[in-house]
Image (cartoon, grey):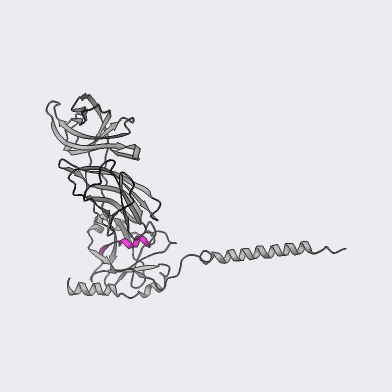
Amino acid sequence: MTAAALVACLALLIAPQPSALSNTWVHWQAWRPINTSVTSEPALVRFELPIAVYGSAQLDLADVRIIDDSGQEVPFAIDLAQQPQPSQVWNYAALSDVGFVPGSYTQAVADVGAGRVLHNTLRLDIAESESDFFEWVAIDASDDRETWRIVRERVPIYRFRSDGLEGRQTVTFPETSSRWLRVRILDGKQRFPIDGVTVSREVEARVEREPLAATVTLNPHSPERKSWWDADLGVAAVPVTSVAFEATQPAFHRPITVSVSDDGATWTEVAQGDIYRESGSEEVSVDVPEGRGRYWRVTVFNRNDAPIEGLRVRLLTTPRYVAFRQMPGHSYYMLYGNSRVTAPDYDFVLLTSRDQRDAAPVVHAGPQSDNTAYQSPEPWTERNAWVLWVALLAAVVIVGALAIRSMRTPPTSG
């Protein structure tokens, strides 16, 4: 670390409370200095939103503000790190040659059409009567329906509704434009019911994710046939977008669920998936549609197998970046912790493109400090509701006493 960087870091650690907080911004509980570099002209910059902010800000971050050293509000944008969502259209494929080869496999040939359209994903429609199953699948491709090449040698599909798991009935394979795809269910004991096949092309995009600092530990009170892995992130409403696994065991397949809790007692399931390793192929992560919470539980369904050897579990998040325009000669602060405000609406979001904001140099937010000038934004009546209740009770008592007194006073004669 250079001497200049060290001085900048020390300055952040001992940063005094900005005087601007004593005026307009007294209703914000917390602030952080933003460590910007010296600039001679206006410049876009961005910084990663610290995880601890989620514990103090509103759930949708509506109370986050950027101000400069004069107390002026600075327009900004909060961007979730790029998560391209591939457009995926499923197309029906006509089935033929559906049959069973005893001792080998069930097969079906899917005709995806003569248009030479690229595809790399196949979804099996399995009879509803098959509520619980686990099978290995192979996918072959052909341009003439005579010569076949293996494009996916062995991949699991499953469904365990007895455990509340819809499972996986989708298979991916290297991109191909071949017209015919042959599906083989590698179970020679009995015919497997394939009701239909649809295909699509899914473009896999690199998603930015970062591991969260919390340790995920095995719960010693895990129920039979399951392993619970629990984590306390220490901060409320932390977003988790993926769970990653490492294991020393050479081969396994386990269904997974991910649950979240605000109190560590009541759990809500937010994701299902599976992890596997077999014959050189593996899948060792499960995506989580962004859940929010402090306590997290990953359930590994062992069923009748022993727990996976050497299993380690990590929680990951997709970072958010805050971008704004830095002006020469100014310092900047991030504020949050105001339950009464709504999200701001700035032209900045429209006047800058997402590509421009993503290309901005990264600066850093300093440690959190409490606003010593803080005043609650809650109305006096809400902050002191007990006073109103006491006044109401007193009024009831007085009215009751007057009513009793009037009942006891004899009427005067005319």
Residue 61 position in % (x across, y down): 37, 59
Tell how many labels.
0
Residue that protrudes farthest toward the left in the picture: 147
Residue that protrudes farthest toward the right in the picture: 414
Query: Can you say which quadrant of the picture contains the N terminus?
Result: bottom left
* Residue beneath the point at 46% across and 66% down: 377
Residue 198 position in % (x across, y down): 26, 33
Horizontally, is 22 left or right of 403 in the view?
left
Residue 64, quarter of the rendered image: bottom left
Task: Specify whether residue 120 is in view.
Answer: no
> Is 181 in the magenta?
no
Residue 116, quarter of the rendered image: top left
Question: Which of the two residues, 98 or 61, is positioned nearer the viewer here?
Answer: 98
Q: Is residue 259 above or below residue 332?
A: above
Horizontally, is 217 left or right of 251 in the view?
right
- In this picture, which residue range is highlighted in magenta? 43-60
Task: Specify whether residue 363 is in view.
Answer: yes
* Residue beneath the point at 29% across and 31% down: 126
Residue 380 position in % (x across, y down): 52, 67
